[in-house]
Image (cartoon, grey):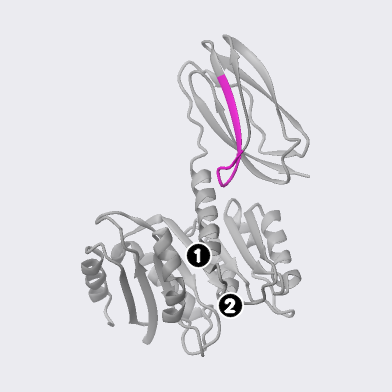
C-alpha cells in the first residue's frame, strides 16, 4: 500500500468493525519505501479516541523490524487498549537515522486523520536502540508526547547523551532497566539529568536481568510502566484549582518547592462552618497522607508537614466546605 489516501480508507474500514486490526504496510516517503506496523485493539467503540503508543524497535536486523516489534507488543497494547504505531528503521535497523525520524514524525502528525487516536494521549517507548531514540527523538518532540518509557537504552562509553534535557520539564519518564545492563552508564546518568531538569522519573531495576526485552513478566512490567506514565500525565493535566465564589479558600500561595522536613503554613478562609480536608498523593494517585477536621467560619491557619515525604513530586488536594483546590509541589533534600 503506497498511497496515504488508501491507507486512511483501509484502516477506517477495519477500525469500524470493533475487532482487533493489524496492518503491516509500506508507504513511499521522500522517494523511498518505508515500512511500518499498526495495531488497533479490540473492544474499542466506534468514534472512541484511544491513547497511542509510538514504539521504536531495537537495533538487530536479524531479529527486529517494525513488524517483529509490533508482534512483541501486541498483547501489551491489547491489555491497555492502546493503538500501537511502530515505524521501521530501514535497512540498517537504526530508528534514529534522519529519514527514519522524519518518517516517524510524518506518521505521528497524520495519525489523528487516519487512526482513532486522542492527540492529547500520545506516548513514546523503545527498547535498546529504540530506548536510546526515545530520549533523542522524544526530547525534540516534547509537544507531541505526554510521557515516555525507555527500556535498556543502548548507550556506549564513547556515546554522547542526547541534548535537550531542559525541554522535558514536567514530563513523566519511566525507566525500565536490567541490573546487569551497565546501569552506571545507561541508566543513572540519564535518570539524574532528567530529575535535575524537572522531569518526573520512576525507575524499575530488574534484578538479575541483562540487556533483553524477553522477560517472563514483560507485559506486566510494560503495563505497570504505561499506567504510571499515563496516571502522572493525567494528574498533571488535572492540577488546575477549582475555586468557588465569595473568595473562600486558600489565602496563601502554596510553594512549588520545599526542603524535606519543612512545615508548610497555609491559611484558609471559611465562609461557613464545615469539614476541612487535605490529601497528599504521589503522581500515580497513591494517598500518602490525609487529615480531616471540623472548622468554624473565618480565617484559620494550618500546617502541612513534609517529614515523611522523600525527595519527589506530590499533589495536595485541599477541600473546604465551599470549594476544592489541587496544587503540585516538589520536595528536595
The residue lying at 47 percent from left, 81 percent from top is 99
**Image coordinates for residue 327, horizontal then vertical, percent:** 58, 35
Above or below — where is 257 with respect to 133? above
Local packing at callout 2 (Cα closer than 10 Å; few below 14, some 14-19, many 20+) is many
Screen quadrant of the N terminus: bottom left
Q: Of residues 4 and 18, which is closer to you in this image?
A: 18
Q: Quarter of the image holding residue 135? A: bottom right
User: Does the image show residue 30?
Assistant: no
308 inside magenta stretch:
no
**Image coordinates for residue 11, horizontal then vertical, percent:** 26, 70
Choose the circle earlier in sequence order: 1 or 2.
1
Instruction: From the viewer's perspective, tell me whether residue 233 is left or right of residue 197.
Output: left
Magenta highlight range = 276-287
Residue 124 is labelled as: 1
Local packing at callout 1 (Cα closer than 10 Å; few below 14, some 14-19, many 20+) is many
The residue lying at 47 percent from left, 70 percent from top is 55
Q: Is mark 1 on a helix, strand or loop?
A: strand
Residue on which the image places disc 2: 129
**Image coordinates for residue 101, horizontal then vertical, percent:** 48, 75
- What kind of secondary structure does the magenta stretch mostly adopt? strand
Amino acid at each position: 500500500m503506497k498511497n496515504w489516501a488508501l491507507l486512511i480508507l483501509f484502516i477506517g474500514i477495519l477500525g469500524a468493525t470493533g475487532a482487533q486490526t493489524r496492518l503491516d504496510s509500506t508507504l513511499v516517503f521522500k522517494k523511498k519505501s518505508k515500512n511500518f506496523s499498526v495495531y488497533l485493539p479490540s473492544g474499542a467503540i466506534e468514534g472512541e479516541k484511544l491513547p497511542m503508543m509510538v514504539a521504536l524497535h531495537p537495533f538487530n536486523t536479524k531479529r527486529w523490524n517494525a513488524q517483529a516489534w509490533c508482534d512483541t507488543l501486541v498483547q501489551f497494547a491489547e491489555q491497555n487498549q492502546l493503538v500501537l504505531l511502530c515505524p521501521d528503521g530501514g535497512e540498517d535497523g537504526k530508528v534514529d537515522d534522519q529519514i527514519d525520524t522524519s518518517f516517524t514524525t510524518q506518521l505521528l502528525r497524520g495519525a489523528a486523520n487516519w487512526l482513532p487516536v486522542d492527540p492529547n494521549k500520545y506516548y513514546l517507548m523503545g527498547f535498546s536502540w529504540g530506548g536510546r531514540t526515545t530520549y533523542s527523538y522524544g526530547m525534540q518532540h516534547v509537544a507531541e508526547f505526554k510521557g515516555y518509557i525507555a527500556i535498556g537504552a543502548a548507550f556506549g562509553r564513547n556515546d554522547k547523551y542526547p541534548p535537550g534535557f531542559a525541554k522535558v520539564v514536567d514530563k513523566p519518564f519511566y525507566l525500565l532497566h536490567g541490573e546487569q545492563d551497565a546501569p552506571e552508564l545507561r541508566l543513572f546518568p540519564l535518570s539524574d539529568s532528567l530529575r535535575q531538569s524537572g522531569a518526573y522519573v520512576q525507575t524499575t531495576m530488574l534484578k538479575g536481568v541483562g540487556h533483553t526485552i524477553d522477560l517472563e513478566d514483560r507485559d506486566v512490567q510494560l503495563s505497570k510502566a504505561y499506567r504510571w506514565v499515563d496516571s502522572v500525565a493525567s494528574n498533571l493535566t488535572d492540577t488546575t484549582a477549582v475555586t468557588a465564589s465569595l473568595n473562600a479558600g486558600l489565602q496563601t500561595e502554596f510553594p512549588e518547592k520545599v526542603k524535606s522536613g519543612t512545615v508548610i503554613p497555609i491559611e484558609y478562609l471559611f465562609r461557613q462552618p464545615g469539614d476541612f480536608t487535605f490529601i497528599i498523593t504521589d503522581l500515580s494517585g497513591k494517598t500518602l497522607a490525609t487529615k480531616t477536621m471540623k472548622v468554624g467560619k473565618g480565617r484559620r491557619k494550618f500546617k502541612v508537614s513534609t517529614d515523611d515525604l522523600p525527595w519527589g513530586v506530590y499533589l495536595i488536594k485541599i477541600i473546604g466546605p465551599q470549594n476544592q483546590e489541587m496544587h503540585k509541589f516538589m520536595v528536595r533534600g
